[in-house]
Image (cartoon, helix red, strand yellow):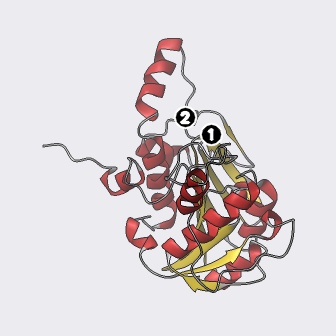
Amino acid sequence: MTTDALARFRWLQGQARPLDEIYTVLFVRERDPGEVLRRFGCGEEKEMSFAELDVEVSDFLVGTDGGDGGGYVGVVAAGDWCLAVEPMGWSAVMDERLIRLSVGSEVVAVTRHEYADDHFAYAVDGSVVTTFELLTPDARYGADKDRLDPLMREVGLPPDATESDDEWEARYDDLAPNALARAFALAERLTGVTFTAGVLDGPLLVGPIADAHLHGPARLSTQRSVTLAELVDKHLQAGGVAVAGIDRVGDGSCGS
């Protein structure tokens, strides 16, 4: 009987996954959740569940048509590391913020983006060591782009260039359904932290990402607000036209 080495990350795939088509998960070494939020530029913080964070993100998406990401990040301690989850967002892997987050520390980031490219990034003390798109791990960039090559081979993210079209197609067919799980396996090798669904069960320290809220001060809700699906249903019942930026009613999806 064979064992699926990536089974612990399969919860991130399929229709029942709690995270949607776009998100970033960040591992930050030896920083507490409050400090991680400050490095995101969050001027306010509040403890809440992942479901409550999801509502904040949904409301932000409705107000911005999704072009500025999800607007919020939730952080939880995990041993010597913190895990930061940015639903519907990618700001954590913008070069300036990744560098800021890594100063005096170490950062591993995995970004999932249904309508663009999935990414992996590794930064240490203000320097981006290596970064690559998950489907093309042979095309890496960074100050020491080959540093993780042995670990990449171990988890099935081959860093070596393909030599023929047939080899490239075979690699793509292998990576397409597995690259995301392998990226989290690589993050686990670097941090010793496994990103499990249980991470989203406990309370998160949540804050609004500063540069996502350029049209006014951000405020965390003090009471339950409606979800994106509820807003869409209400809009459709009123006979309105399609809501900008929403591809599928009821699942919280946003267009690129």
- Do the numbered discs 2 and 1 sit on residues whose CB atoms are within 8 Å? yes
Which is nearer the N-term, disc 2 or disc 1? 1
Q: Quadrant of residue 32?
A: bottom right
Categorize mark 1 by other alpha carbons within 10 Å: few (<14), some (14-19), many (20+): few
Residue 149 shows in the view = yes
Name the residue nearer the viewer: 177 or 115. 115
Label 2 and label 1: CA atoms lie apart by 8 Å
- Tag 2 secondary structure: loop
Furthest residue toward left: 1
**At label 1, which amino acid type do we have?**
Asp
Residue located beneath label 1 in the image: 117
For residue 226, above or below residue 43 = above
Extreme residue toward the top, this view: 165
Identified by mark 2, the residue type is: Leu
Among all residues in the image, which is located at the extreme right? 215
> Looking at the picture, how far across and down is residue 166, in whole percent?
47, 13
Q: Is residue 38 left or right of residue 228?
A: right
Mark 1, secondary structure of its residue: loop
Give the image location of residue 42, x and y in percent. Answer: 76, 77
Q: Quadrant of the C terminus?
A: top right
Residue carrying label 2? 135
Q: Quadrant of residue 204?
A: bottom right
Q: Residue at x 75, y 50 (%)?
A: 67
Residue at point 63%, 78% (across, down): 206
The residue at the point 44 percent across, 72 percent down is: 199
Q: Is there any visible trace of residue 80 in the rendered image?
A: no
Q: Say whether residue 240 is left or right of residue 126.
A: left
